[in-house]
Image: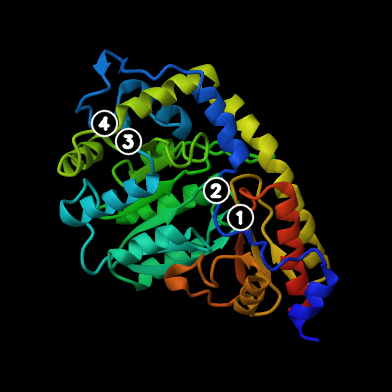
């Protein structure tokens, strides 16, 4: 009897026409329904801040939306702009602006390289790769990127012109950068501030599920180490309200924002201001803290189920996993170099996981051990079945 037959025998509930999916950190239907129910009670605004939201213009976003972004990111409203749905789009446009026009202290070129703490966000890596910018992997530790490795790379390599970070509840480990790590990292980067971009994607700034360490403002640390023109802080409401219809934010120096807006003026004649106004009204009705408490009530039980099953693997010396205090993901490392086999076997049992190596630049996991788990979208029963499949496969293969 092969492994698949054994697992199907152990789990008689497995059906050929039922599939499970732990690939993407999407808000669940229940989360979206909560947001929709509140949105339906809000009258769509056509005017706000003395601005006709129906028309062109306001390339920096309306003031009230900029204030909302500043609240989420912990930045200054005057140095924060509000745009459309995805912060990933902002990152793409930032790199393009740096590459083609240049920013105050960032000019990407044909030989530019970017540091990529890993495991990290696969779409960040795909975006950078599409520009033809070389990615250099930096091991990720519980308190942030490995600073010894960063220092060694910067001493050895030329044309290191940036780093991409998810500083709070990092994707996929869920770990949060410590102040000590960020302070030391910024001190290192200060020597390269003539041409260096710190992409600070704070996608999970408000997504605490358990007690999480507080963080000193990245803005204040950037000022301390003369990196005001190097720091680009990104965020959005995508995992706070509606993933497909949120608004995004960018905070940086006034000089950088002016250059970036000028670049975007060749792409668009303004963001979706009605959606910005709708989000402003939404968070007037349900403040951010209350909204995220509702999300926590849905997400935390899913994290507890995932942790329970991964603990059985850890206790059996079949691997290790991150202990996220928030965000949308878990990161599991197999005890053997066989994550490709685990993922393939799960696929044959109708459980979809991201391909092996997805959380690393160029899809190359040097140890072939890492698997990203996204428990947010399935309902509790589907999630439990998914974790039963995954843990059974690991126990048989390891």
Of the numbered discs in the image, which one, if any, rests on residue 83?
3
**Dot 2 alpha-carbon crowd within 10 angstroms: few under 14, some 14 to 19, many 20 or more:** many
Instruction: Mark yes or no: residue 21 visible.
Output: yes
Instruction: Mark yes or no: residue 66 visible.
Output: no
Q: Which residue is at 53% across, 29% downward?
A: 36
Residue located beneath label 1 in the image: 374
Between disc 1 and disc 4, the foreground one is: 1
Q: Is residue 283 left or right of residue 336?
A: left
Q: Are marks 2 and 4 in contact (CB under 8 Å)?
A: no
Reply above or below: 258 against 278.
Answer: below
Between disc 2 and disc 4, the foreground one is: 2
Residue located beneath label 4 in the image: 60
Of the numbered discs in the image, which one, if any, rests on residue 26?
2
Foreground residue among 130 and 35: 35
**Between discs 1 and 2, the one toward the N terminus:** 2
Q: Secondary structure at mark 2?
A: loop
Between disc 3 and disc 2, the foreground one is: 2
């Amino acid at each position: 009897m092969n492994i698949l037959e054994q697992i199907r025998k152990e789990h008689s509930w497995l059906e050929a026409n039922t599939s499970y999916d732990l690939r993407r950190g999407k808000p669940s239907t229940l989360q979206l329904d909560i947001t929709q129910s509140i949105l339906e009670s809000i009258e769509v605004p056509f005017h706000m801040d003395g601005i006709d939201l129906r028309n062109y213009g306001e390339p920096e976003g309306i003031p009230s939306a900029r204030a909302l972004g500043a609240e989420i990111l912990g930045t200054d409203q005057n140095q924060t702009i509000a745009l459309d749905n995805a912060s990933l789009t902002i990152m793409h446009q930032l790199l393009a602006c740096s590459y083609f026009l240049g920013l105050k202290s960032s000019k990407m070129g044909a030989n530019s390289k970017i540091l990529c703490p890993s495991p990290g966000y696969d779409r960040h890596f795909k975006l950078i790769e599409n520009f033809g910018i070389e990615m250099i992997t930096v091991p990720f530790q519980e308190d942030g990127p490995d600073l010894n490795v960063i220092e060694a790379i910067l001493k050895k390599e030329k044309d290191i012109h940036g780093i991409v970070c998810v500083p709070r509840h990092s994707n996929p480990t869920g770990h949060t950068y410590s102040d000590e790590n960020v302070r030391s990292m910024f001190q290192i980067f200060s020597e390269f501030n003539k041409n260096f971009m710190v992409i600070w994607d704070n996608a999970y700034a408000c997504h605490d599920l358990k007690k999480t360490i507080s963080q000193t403002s990245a803005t204040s640390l950037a000022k301390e180490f003369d990196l005001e023109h190097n720091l680009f802080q990104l965020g959005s409401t995508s995992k706070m309200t509606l993933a497909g219809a949120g608004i995004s934010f960018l905070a940086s120096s006034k000089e950088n924002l002016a250059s970036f807006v000028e670049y975007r003026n060749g792409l668009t004649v303004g963001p979706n201001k009605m959606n910005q106004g709708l989000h402003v009204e939404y968070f007037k009705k349900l403040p951010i803290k209350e909204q995220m408490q509702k999300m926590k009530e849905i997400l935390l039980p899913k994290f507890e189920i995932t942790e329970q099953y991964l603990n059985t693997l850890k206790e059996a010396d079949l691997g290790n996993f991150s202990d996220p205090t928030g965000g949308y993901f878990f990161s599991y490392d197999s005890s053997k170099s066989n994550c490709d086999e685990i993922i393939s076997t799960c696929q044959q049992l109708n459980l979809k996981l991201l391909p092996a190596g997805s959380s690393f630049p160029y899809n190359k996991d040097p140890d072939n051990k890492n698997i990203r788990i996204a428990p947010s979208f399935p309902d509790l029963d589907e999630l439990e079945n998914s974790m039963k499949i995954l843990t059974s496969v690991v126990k048989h293969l390891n």
